[in-house]
């Protein structure tokens, strides 16, 4: 089934099952690999993206639920060469750890 998504300001048409988790469409179909797989049940937050500015666990959110909405991944948070304020604070306060969960933590903040 063709589903139209707007990810990081760009429109994409994907041919996937409507119940496919948004995470796998973002990573495997569209190539947005900044969003990570962690637990697969929406508990850990590594897969967090924003839909219409609201934090959503993409591993347990069906792609059909994002149709017609603006999806933002970690790749779309910064504009041009300017980091988002949360990303700047992350650096200023030396929050970075191993990096795997960081994108989800930033998208939740």
Image: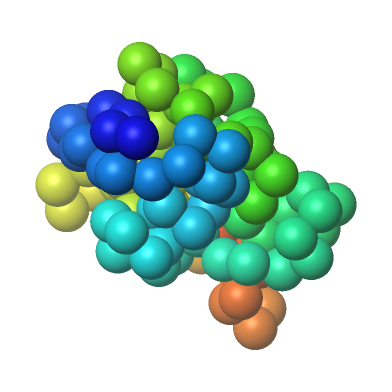
| Residue at the (29%, 44%) spot, across then down | 15
Relative to 29, say whether 37 is above or below.
below
Left or right of residue 51: residue 5: left
Question: x%, y% of residue 87?
Answer: 47, 52
Closer-to-camera residue (9/84): 9
| Residue at the (54%, 46%) spot, across then down | 20
Relative to 32, say whether 11 is above or below.
above
Question: x%, y% of residue 93?
Answer: 62, 61
Residue reaching furthest bottom?
98
Closer-to-camera residue (6/107): 6
Closer-to-camera residue (28/103): 28
Relative to 99, say whether 27 is above or below.
above
Query: Can the viewer see residue 49?
Result: no
Left or right of residue 72: residue 10: left
How is colour applied across the structure in the image?
rainbow
Image quarter where the N terminus lies is top left
| Residue at the (17%, 53%) spot, across then down | 81
Relative to 43, say whether 5 is above or below.
above
Image quarter where the C terminus lies is top right
Question: x%, y% of residue 37?
Answer: 63, 67
How many tags in the picture? 0
Q: Quadrant of residue 90?
A: bottom right
Closer-to-camera residue (11/45): 11
Question: x%, y% of residue 91?
Answer: 51, 64
| Residue at the (65%, 83%) spot, across then down | 98
Left or right of residue 2: residue 16: right
Query: Can the viewer see residue 2?
Result: yes
């Amino acid at each position: 089934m063709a589903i139209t998504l707007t990810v990081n300001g760009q429109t994409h048409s994907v041919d996937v099952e409507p119940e496919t988790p948004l995470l796998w469409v973002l990573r495997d179909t569209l190539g947005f690999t900044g969003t990570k797989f962690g637990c697969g049940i929406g508990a850990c937050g590594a897969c967090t993206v924003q839909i219409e500015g609201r934090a959503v666990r993409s591993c347990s959110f069906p792609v059909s639920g994002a149709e017609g909405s603006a999806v933002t991944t970690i790749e779309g948070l910064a504009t041009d060469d300017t980091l988002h304020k949360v990303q700047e604070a992350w650096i200023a306060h030396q929050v970075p750890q191993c990096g795997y969960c960081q994108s989800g933590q930033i998208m939740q903040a």
